[in-house]
Amino acid sequence: KDAEALRKLGYVQELVREMGGFSNFAVSFSIISISTGGIQLYGYGLQHGGPLLVTAGWLLVSFFTLLVALSMAELASTYPTSGGLYHWSSFLAGRRIGWFTACFNGIGLLGVLAGVDYGLARLLIGFMKWPDSLTVTFTIYGLILFSHAILNHRGVRVVAWLNNFSAGYHMAVTALLVGALIFSGLAQPVSFLLHPHHSDGFSYPYSFLIGLLLAQWILTGYDASANVTEETINPSKSAPWGIFLSVFISVVVGFIMFVVMTLSIPNLDQATAFGDNAFPEILRLRLGDNLGGLVVALVLGAAWLCGLATLTSVSRMVYAFSRDGGLPWANLWSHVSPKTRTPSFAIWMLAGVAMALAASVKLYSAVVSVAVVALYISYGLSLIARIYGTHHGRFKKGDWNLGRFGGIITWIALLWVGFITVVLMLPPNEQAGQVLGVSFTGLVFLWYSVVEKRYQGPTHEDLPKSASKNRPTDLQESPIPVS
């Protein structure tokens, strides 16, 4: 049944459907990885807003991110393909917006992969007390990327099992962290959560805005559930629930974790001075070297699992995009290994590009900003396509939908995407804006000079033969999917 639904969207079943609903949810939940984002950017949050930013900022970002997730879940139910956002935009608004959506989604997911794995390498070096040099950092980073690539190469069965394990592992680690801190005794009253604090030299309102990167970095990457739909059983229901529940559960658990973590800070100025190492150092101060070190080690394990799931997601998106001829050497990146049934060449290519990306951006928070902004640009483009498709009668709701509230939720979500995109390119993360500005200029040049003439967009087998020679463009009616 799932293979037939995929065929009616224009594609044959090449990947193996071995993921159930929980596995689909686990991929997105593992990429969101509240403990990974917490350990990597908690110090950034203290520097740019303090306890008020960590708690109130989390709730603010969480509310609007849930609206974005709801809108995307509705689209995932209608178009259950590995292309995810790329196919949503293409089917609803044409090949041009679909191509740009795919490009920014790929850049964003690559940024997430680089941000998670490079951040893990830096934290691992600090945890193990190894020499802090670029050579050591990039050696560890390369080994982490290699481990993710080799496991993804071996097949979806191994990755699906690890993602299932990852979901439970993340919950267990967070529960241990919270329980240990509460048992050791909180250091601050509840009113401390509303304490404004910053040490970045900016005005506090500005610091609070740019500090939202902490929460938005964590609540990112949940489109992974859509990217693995061709490997998921009953994807029109499993993928939407995977997107929504991964965000909702992360919001609740993340808020509890940050509240307890913040109330455990013995001295705010000292914690802020720890910088990027604030999270592990607070754990060591409150729990001691042994238990604190154990919790930090377990969180580093969660970060490794997060990177593994991220490479799974981006490789499937690149596979789907290349299948339609969207990238140079597309036949290579869309190749599925007959032995492992995975897009093996795409997996190794992406690991190499992630290595280069981390080497090209100097400030770590800028790497993170590139990832978040690029991803949310692709999210925004898919929401614009949904609005456009609804207006032109192209969007047909799937099995999982928001009913009459879908339209207003999409508009509010789109406004948030526009707002957070601008905020996260402000100083000190202006390099993210520069990288994305250069990327956008290059993509526009490529589209009008080369791609527009050669790229036809997604196929659709149910089109009449006369129409199938001219696949959907911005002015042609988009194919209507089966519910």
Image (tube, grey):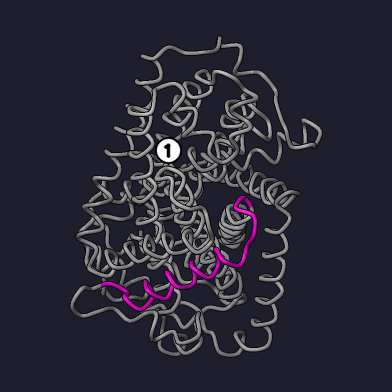
Is 88 within the magenta?
Answer: no
In terms of secondary structure, what is the magenta stretch mainly? helix
Name the residue: 46% across, 55% down. 75
Image coords of residue 20 (percent x, y): 23, 51
Residue 202 vertical placement versus 349 (above, below): above
Indicate the quadrant where residue 241 lies.
Answer: top left
Name the residue: 33% across, 28% down. 290
Q: For the magenta stretch, what is the residue range?
A: 342-365
Name the residue: 50% across, 67% down. 86
Is 362 within the magenta?
Answer: yes
The kind of residue tagged 1 is Ser
Name the residue: 29% across, 65% down. 152
User: Label 1, on which residue?
Assistant: 35
- Location of the C terminus by quadrant is bottom left
Q: Nearer the viewer, residue 403 or 444?
A: 444
Image coords of residue 204 (percent x, y): 77, 30
Indicate the quadrant where residue 284 lies.
Answer: top left
Q: Nearer the viewer, residue 156 or 365?
A: 365
- Location of the N terminus by quadrant is bottom left
Q: How many marks?
A: 1
Image coords of residue 230 (percent x, y): 30, 64
Q: Nearer the viewer, residue 46 or 391?
A: 46
